Amino acid sequence: MEGQIFLLCCCFTLFSVTMLCSAVDTISAGGSISDGETVVSSDGCFELGFFDPENSKRYLGIWYKKISPGTVVWVANRNIPLNDTSGVLRLTNQGILVLSTETKANITIWSSSSSGEPVTNPVARLLETGNLVVSVGGKIVWQSFDYIGDTFLPGMKCGRNLVTGLDNYLTSWKRSSDPSSGEYTNKLDHNGYPQIFLRKGPVIRFRSGPWNGLRFSGMPNLKPNPIYTFEFVYNDQEIYYKYELINSSVVTRMVLNQFGSLQRFVWINRTQDWILYVSAEMDNCDHYSLCGAYGSCNIANLPPCGCLRGFKPKFQSDWKSGDWSNGCVRKTELTCKDGEGFIKIPSVKLPDTRNSWFNRTIDLKECEKWCLRNCSCTAYSSLDIRGGGSGCLIWFNELIDIREYTENGQDLYLRMAASELGSNGEMKRRVRTIIIPVLLGAVIIGVIYVLLAKKKKRLKLGEQIIEDKQSDGNNDEDLKLPLFSFNAIADATNNFSDKNKLGEGGYGPVYKGKFRDGQDIAVKRLSKESKQGDGQFKNEVILIAKLQHRNLVRLLGCCIQGEEKMLVYEYMPNKSLDSFIFDRAQSSLLDWPQRCKIINGIARGLLYLHQDSRLRIIHRDLKASNILLDEEMNAKISDFGMAKCFGGDETEANTRRVVGTYGYMSPEYVIDGIFSVKSDVFSFGVLVLEIINGKRNRGFNHPDHKLNLLGHAWKLFQEGRPEDLMDAPVRDSCDISEVGRSIQVGLLCVQQSPEDRPSMASVVLMLSSDISLPQPKEPGFFTERQLIEGDSSSSKIDFCSTNKMTMTLLTAR
């Protein structure tokens, strides 16, 4: 009898253990767990279930089970708590985790997302890493690691998926007893060269600095250690930072707490407690922009803030009172003339890179040349410091948030006026003022003689260019543009072979070429039949030679020989934007992240033209065919033949010669000949809507109405369904809120009145932040019929075109 009882007990124990081990870490399709039940990872380290953080609310979350019970690492319904213990987590047959209550199962409190594809036998499993995954046939279709809370665990990715648009970043708890979203975030910013910002609401508290191949520039304490490895990945699909454990027996986590501190903790078994291993912010110098523009922070100094060499406090009285926020200004302003150079500022945290440009292929020496050629460039540095350094990182405008380190800093090369460069600068200035003029005079005499004897027409056009520059109040020293010989360009283009022809516009044909040194070029050759003659040629040479920006096409030089006039540009392998968005096959290659990148690139290029360049430029012919795409699909504004240069105080002008392309021109420009920066803003708004929709504004048709694309977008916006404007290839990859914001910005740009349209500075801010947007008013020219009626009956068309060409309209005034 005792033997039977013993055998029965053994069988029962074995059965219980078997049941416990069979499905302890999983929930099968149709299965569920209620409040009081849990799912435990196979190693017993993590546990999924319902918990109460001492505020009488219930949450579904994941916490450590073996160590430090109650240390929560992930919360599902952090902003929608349950009021009682009736919560139930179910896995549907469609592979979706659904949190509801027993009493109201049809009301969803929280749910995971769906891939949208049919699934068979989905399984939810809590992995040993603390990652809750839903998988089908071994393939993960959803995971909690894609939705970080306040805790950053090994294997998580903090960053942005450029394909899906998913942003994964840390958000603090509101309080230690309230896991709802707090006011602090730690998020990767991909503007310029990527870096991570810790913010309190919209205000930046701390900046990681850019990745330099070994660590983030602003985190010198991030270095090889025995506990974890770390990496930063930046490719066409994603940008992210992650870390992995070296020894799986070590337990570590990073937490963004409710006070805004980002800290790494390590679990110590001996003391059964978490100890602080490292903090992102080390001291007061880590407060973002503590010393303002061109200021540098050194925690060993008192006060810690000082100005960079060649700079002085902007407001001396503020600095004396301990307020350094207004930063520093140059003692000697830059003039972008010969003699300027760079000083090395060693071992620093590199400045804010949101307004920067980078190139992975060129070295530091070439980087210096690029910076010198661009009058807006203020500093440069290596992109990657490994192996002696490689790549190029260039800054434009003010340098913000610099601090000095005793070790693990990075060298920054700061642009300085000749007089600030010491004895070398003084020597250069003497050479420039004494020897160079003598040599230059001899060269000029020789050149003039040759030009007068052999190239009279070329001299005439060159003199006209200089005269036009001087009439605009510009010094001819600004024009440093190489002149190529006809034979060199003919050789590069295989004698202008039809096989090398890229296309043709109002100016003439464009050819692909390659110089003997291997450099790819695009050559725009003025056609003898073209009505865009010397005026447009001179205009483009004068303007674009002075402009250097990552979102403007770069003019390499020109050719003026006999009747030939040619412009030589950097080659854009992906041609123009219109060849993608208006082509059904090609448009499928442009998902939403790519289109969003192009929109932002055009906006930054226009902002540079309107505000940040040495001249105030109005393009006047912004359209899809004038947006070129480089090998990385970066947008570059091209064709400045119709552009207009404004003086510093000018904001608008009028003309009797209206130039541009129907469908992109603003109402006040077409009807009254008045143009301003707001004319370009209108054209940009049209472009945004075309990029989102994939159809041209002019010629757009819809079976339900006679509106053009602007009118169609306006109608959908009024009806509360702007997302219906999206092109089909965009729908699977888009962030609906991001697309909706872009559509609203586009409609704000095409409003009838120029006073209602935002500036490009506001547009860039609206596209790159979450600020609330004003409601747009009715757009201008939102039907084809209105566009025709808007033209003056007395107007005389000189020549007009479709979106592939440029038109000029003469209007009597």
Image (tube, helix red, strand yellow):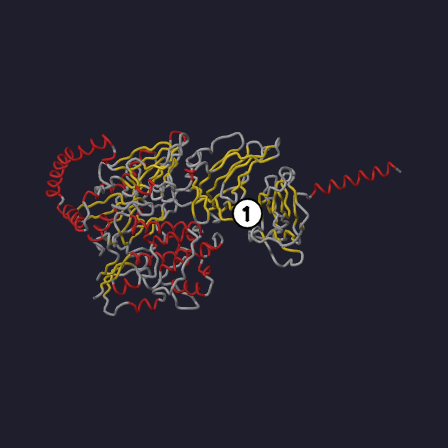
Residue 809 image position (x, y, % from top left): 24, 62
Q: Secondary structure at mark 1?
A: strand
Q: Is 385 on the left-hand or right-hand side of 49?
A: left
**Residue named by callout 1:** 175
Question: Nearest the camera: 537 or 31?
Answer: 31
Q: Name the residue at 12% across, 41% down.
A: 448
- In this view of the protein, can residue 256 be seen by the observer? yes
Mark 1 burial class by Cα count in 10 Å: few <14, some 14-19, many 20+: some
Image vertical order of residue 521 relative to residue 742, above or below: above
Question: Nearest the camera: 153 or 392?
Answer: 153
Question: Nearest the camera: 252 or 583?
Answer: 252
Q: Is 753 on the left-hand or right-hand side of 589?
A: left
Check disc 1 and give the amino acid type.
Arg
Q: Is 474 on the left-hand or right-hand side of 201?
A: left
Residue extending farthest right: 1
- In this view of the protein, can residue 486 be seen by the observer? no
Residue 431 image position (x, y, % from top left): 17, 32
Q: Dividing the image into 4 quarters, which one contains the C terminus?
A: bottom left
> Which of the 4 quarters of the picture holds residue 709?
bottom left
Residue 794 image position (x, y, % from top left): 23, 69
Q: How many marks?
A: 1
Residue extending farthest front: 321
Q: Dividing the image into 4 quarters, which one contains the N terminus?
A: top right
Residue 282 image position (x, y, % from top left): 46, 36
